[in-house]
Image (cartoon, rainbow, N blue to C red):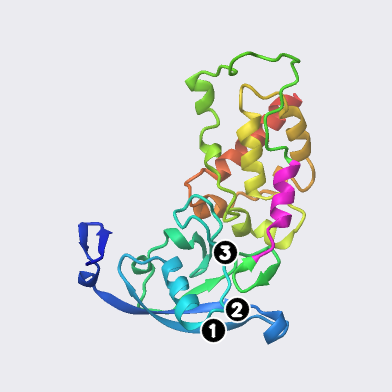
Amino acid sequence: MTAIVETETGPVEAGAIPSFTVTLRIMRFDPENHGPDPYWDEFDVDVHGTDRVLDALHKIKWEQDGSLTFRRSCAHGICGSDAMRINGRNRLACKTLLKDINPNKPITVEPIKGLPVIKDLVVDMEPFFASYREIMPFLIVNDGKHPSAERHQSPEQRERYDDTTKCILCAACTSSCPVFWTDGQYFGPAAIVNAHRFIFDSRDQGATQRLEVLNDKEGVWRCRTTFNCTEACPRGIEVTRAIQEVKRAMITRAF
């Protein structure tokens, strides 16, 4: 039975898609077997125009070096687990087509910055999630009422925070931030984005608490508005704008 692959121009037989060879230059880190310093490793991989960086990493792991370590789960840009630096930019490996990043030159793949590397492309996400937990990412309702139905919200009220509901906690925005690289205590863009999602939710009553948390010296005031976070977000969230809106809310409520 002939395999069929979906392409931009429609379904075609797998064998009809032209293949080419790309070189992936991957930063490796394996302290148990190669010492405490990271090093570069290169792999030549035969791929097709519809392949993504994640597909190339799979081929390397399955066919060339089973010790290569990276995170992945859904492979469709929903879980956010395969965020990494590809040619110097934070991207999701499952959403990055090889043909779109100049495959004629070696493609560099590195772990995201600012978080401790565990092995190869896998980083310790605990500092990232610690900041996320601190902003209380859940609805807070203190009115003492127990409604028999859902709490109503108008389409306009929902639209107010719609953009920041798209966050998939991939850490691409936070690990692209120069302040986060140099200051491990900074909450980071993702935590602020998720605080925004609840601060502007008409059903929530915990905005004051969250704003107090983010008014800390390592909170929103550490943002330098470089827009790295907005550029890095694979979901297209206007991260810098959300941070500015949180700052504005903090000043408005203070006066």
**Magenta stretch: includes residue 225:** no
Q: Which residues are magenta?
A: 123-134
Where 102 sits versus 228, above or below? below
Q: Position of residue 221 (x, y in %)?
A: 72, 44
Name the image quarter holding the N terminus. bottom left
Circle nearer the N terminus (3, 1): 1
- Splitting the image into 4 quarters, where does residue 68 fall? bottom right
Q: Residues within 10 Å of mark 2 (few under 14, many from 20)?
A: many
Q: Horizontally, is 5 left or right of 161 in the view?
A: left
Quote the CA–CA distance across marks 3 and 2. Answer: 14 Å
Q: Which residue is mark 2?
A: 28
Name the image quarter holding the C terminus. top right
- Splitting the image into 4 quarters, where does residue 37 fall? bottom right
Q: Which residue is mark 1?
A: 41
Residue drawn at 38 percent across, 64 percent down? 97
**Magenta stretch: includes residue 125:** yes
Residue drawn at 53 percent across, 77 percent down? 26
Q: Main secondary structure of the magenta part?
A: helix
Per the rendering, the mark at residue 71 is 3
Q: Horizontally, is 31 left or right of 49 in the view?
A: right
Type of the residue with mark 2: Arg
Pointer 1 with pointer 2, Cβ within 8 A: yes
Type of the residue with mark 3: Arg
Q: Residues within 10 Å of mark 1 (few under 14, many from 20)?
A: few
Q: Position of residue 209 (x, y in %)?
A: 77, 31
Residue drawn at 65 percent across, 80 percent down? 38
